[in-house]
Image: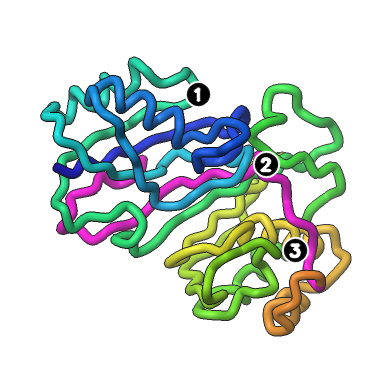
Amino acid sequence: MRIALGIEYDGTSYNGWQRQKNGIGVQQRLEEALAVVANEDIEVVCAGRTDTGVHASGQVVHFDTSAERSDRGWLLGANTNLPPDASVTWARHVSDEFHARFSATGRSYRYVILNRLERSALHRHRAWWVYEPLDDKLMHEAAQQLLGQHDFSAFRAAGCQAKSATRELTAISVDRDGDWLTISVSANAFLMHMVRNITGTLAVVGRGEQPPAWVADVLENRDRTAGGITAPPHGLTLVSVDYPEEFGIPAAY
């Protein structure tokens, strides 16, 4: 039978999502916890692999098992065996046609920037501290030029293994609440470091070093070196994954 889970985690102490030869990935901790519940080895497939230091509030995984447990049993059993920085938020029995990665129709990320002169001790692992003033309205204006289907080569990491750089960005916004800037991005799929590279490029506009129209030039040139820096991972969170209603996957909260 196939089981789907929602999981949230603080990525600070992990070498990303994927199981690692050196270091610990979230996948390893989850598979170890589920193996205790199932009394057999478990291998999970995730909706989107996150990098070292990146967080998730709406990651989705699936796994196959011969163990018969209730949804409640999977949820409580997994959480009993997971460390405090990872938690299963829901569990569902799903059809064999469901696939956490390939059934997904969209993914959404949130990037948080703390924009003030003083650094934060409490939020140092959850936000990028930028002390120079940032103009959120200019950043939002610049971001709108990325909407739609494009070749996002200018925003992919050198080590990205995706066969195509074409992605469809369905929503992007930059909002300010006091000292906090939130960049919300949704797309059908993302390239390696894509959101972090977009964030670093928008920050160039926010500091007044380039006009909003410059972002369109960066996109069109398809040259990663033409844009801004790769923003640090700790400001990034995978917040939700979208699926067709037929699979009955709970919406992220």
Q: Helix, strand or loop at disc 3? A: helix
What residue is disc 3 on?
Answer: 201
Image location (x, y in percent) of residue 213: 74, 78
Q: Disc 1 vs disc 2: which is toward the camera? A: 1
Mark 1 / mark 2, whichever is N-terminal: 1
What residue is disc 2 on?
Answer: 180
Q: Please state if 50 lies on the left or on the right of 174 as rendered.
A: left
Which amino acid, mark 2? Trp
Mark 3 / mark 2, whichever is N-terminal: 2
**How many numbered markers are drawn?**
3
Based on the displayed image, in which of its 4 quarters is residue 34 positioned? Answer: top left
Residue 55 appears in the figure: no
Disc 2 packing (10 Å; few <14; some 14–19; many ≥20): some
Q: Please state if 164 lies on the left or on the right of 2 as rendered.
A: right
Q: CA distance from mark 3 to mark 2?
A: 18 Å
Residue depicted at 59% across the width and 46% down the height: 51
Q: CA distance from mark 3 to mark 1?
A: 30 Å
Residue 91 appears in the figure: yes
Q: Disc 3 vs disc 2: which is toward the camera? A: 3
Image location (x, y in percent) of residue 94: 16, 47
Q: Helix, strand or loop at disc 1? A: loop
Q: Nearer the viewer, residue 164 or 57?
A: 164
Mark 3 / mark 1, whichever is N-terminal: 1
Disc 3 packing (10 Å; few <14; some 14–19; many ≥20): many
Which amino acid, mark 1? Asp
Residues in magenta, as a range: 226-253
The answer to whether residue 208 is above or below residue 125 is: below
Q: Helix, strand or loop at disc 2? A: strand
What residue is disc 1 on?
Answer: 85
